[in-house]
Amino acid sequence: MRGFACLICSLLFPLSALLPAQDKPAEKPTMVTPMAPTSGPRFEFLDEVSYYEQRFERLAEAIPPEKYSWRPVEGVRTIGDVYMHVVSSNYNVARMLGTPFPAGVDPKAMMAYANDKAKVMQALKDSFAQIRAAILAVKDSDLNKEIKTPRGPTTILGAFFMVSGQYGEHLGQSIVYSRLVGVVPPWTEERQRQETEKPKQ
């Protein structure tokens, strides 16, 4: 009986060797995220970007949807236009730093929905994520590398200063706009509330 079982096994083994091997599922490529710097110009600029991102998004959230099409006078940007200008700048600066536009993203075409609060809010979040990824992708050894900008040639480090100045300019513009439509910036409102809640001496 044992000999018969061995005979069956010896006959089946060669047949199994001829069967096609099952394909292993293809392994997904591992996405390598550049490590965030812990010091230096990129670290400091990322902190600056985070500060302005939080300010822009909080202020944009505080503006009522119907006010996104408001402008102080004819011929200047609306509230929504200012936010979308920041969005466009983020994508364009990221491209200057070597990170191309994501598939399907056209900053110029995105200006068409500047009056749509929900889309503007999402665009702000996505564009800040894009510029952050571009900064992380830059090597510290390339900070003095020359790049072209709308203002002319400068270094990557010089572009950091340029962007920071532009953020300050448009945040200030957005704060004035918000005040003109009766919206107090959330951080100012919080400070005022804290001051009124302090016990009187």
Image (cartoon, rainbow, N blue to C red):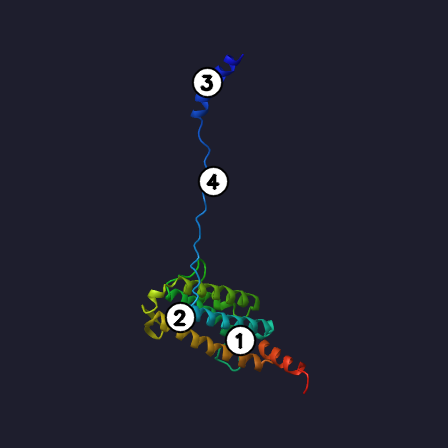
Q: Position of residue 117 (x, y in %)?
A: 57, 69
In-front residue for pair 113/29: 29
The image shows residue 54, relative to residue 177, as above or below, that is above
Between marks 2 and 1, how big is the CA–CA gap?
A: 32 Å
Q: Position of residue 112 (x, y in %)?
A: 49, 68
Query: Which one is in front in this view, the residue at disc 3 or the one at disc 4?
Result: 3
- Disc 1 marks which residue? 79
- Disc 4 marks which residue? 25
- Disc 3 marks which residue? 10
The image shows residue 116, relative to residue 168, as above or below, that is above
Q: Are marks 2 and 1 in contact (CB under 8 Å)?
A: no
Earlier in the chain: of badge 2 and badge 3, it is 3
Q: Position of residue 5 (x, y in %)?
A: 52, 15
Indicate the quadrant containing the N terminus: top left, top right, bottom left or bottom right: top right
Q: Secondary structure at mark 1?
A: helix
Q: Are marks 1 and 3 in contact (CB under 8 Å)?
A: no
- Disc 2 marks which residue? 41
Name the residue furthest front.
201
Between marks 1 and 3, how big is the CA–CA gap?
A: 81 Å
Earlier in the chain: of badge 4 and badge 2, it is 4
Amino acid carrying label 2: it is Pro
Between marks 3 and 4, how big is the CA–CA gap?
A: 31 Å
Q: Are marks 4 and 2 in contact (CB under 8 Å)?
A: no
Query: Is 68 on the left or on the right of 196, as rendered?
Result: left
Q: Quadrant of residue 19?
A: top left
